[in-house]
Image (cartoon, grey):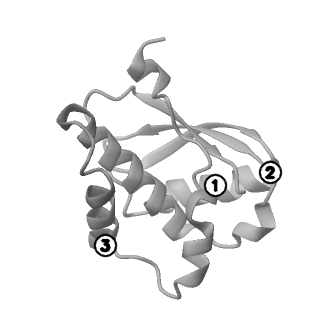
Amino acid sequence: MNFYRGLGVIIAGVIAALSGCQSARHEPMTAKEIATLARSQCASAHAANQQDCVYLRRMQYGIQNNFSDVERYRGRECHLTITYGRNQHYSVLRTTGDEALCMKAWGVVSSAADLPAPPPHFPAKSVLVFRPG
């Protein structure tokens, strides 16, 4: 499978990874804090993959930053097919999985103002996998 085609499924367990850290913070991270954290975590990546790593981390943290009630959705799963539009926001094209989680994830992704644009070489459509742990 081509790396970038496989990259269509871009974030697995997007909420679970930092749910503990998120609940320990009382205030959401700013877009600048998210970008700084993403760059520091991707510093060891090769130059060609660093842009992708930073994008994926910024997406992950941006979604987590806007997602509340993680405990309510623990053990459920939802796949969102998304695209990035000319309006510089993500649109949800399709959902599959737990209805309540999908509705919550749809709202978060479509209304989050601080999500980064995908790198130019990313596929037009991507799938976000929400799997609160």
Q: Amino acid at mark 3?
A: Glu
Query: Circle 1 — which element?
Result: helix
* Distance in Å between CA atoms under marks 2 and 1: 12 Å
Q: Which residue is mark 3?
A: 33
Q: Residues within 10 Å of mark 2 (few under 14, many from 20)?
A: some
Looking at this view, is 124 or 2 the one in front? 2
Residue farthest toward the bottom in the current orientation of the protein: 26
Query: Circle 3 — which element?
Result: helix
Measured from the top left, where is residue 88 in percent x and y?
Answer: 32, 49
Query: Circle 2 — which element?
Result: loop
Q: Is residue 79 left or right of residue 58?
A: right
Residue 105 numbered mark, or none: 1
Which residue is at a point 31% across and 49% down the rendered structure image? 54
Residue farthest toward the top in the current orientation of the protein: 1
The correct choice, above or below, for 76 with respect to 24 in the image is: above
Residue farthest toward the front in the current orientation of the protein: 44
Q: Of circles 2 and 1, which is in front?
A: 2
Measured from the top left, where is residue 100 in percent x and y?
Answer: 79, 56
The correct choice, above or below, for 14 with respect to 80 in the image is: below
Residue 76 numbered mark, or none: 2
Looking at this view, is 108 or 44 the one in front? 44
Q: Amino acid at mark 1?
A: Ala
Which residue is at a point 70% across and 67% down the rendered structure image? 70
Q: Is residue 59 left or right of residue 37?
A: right
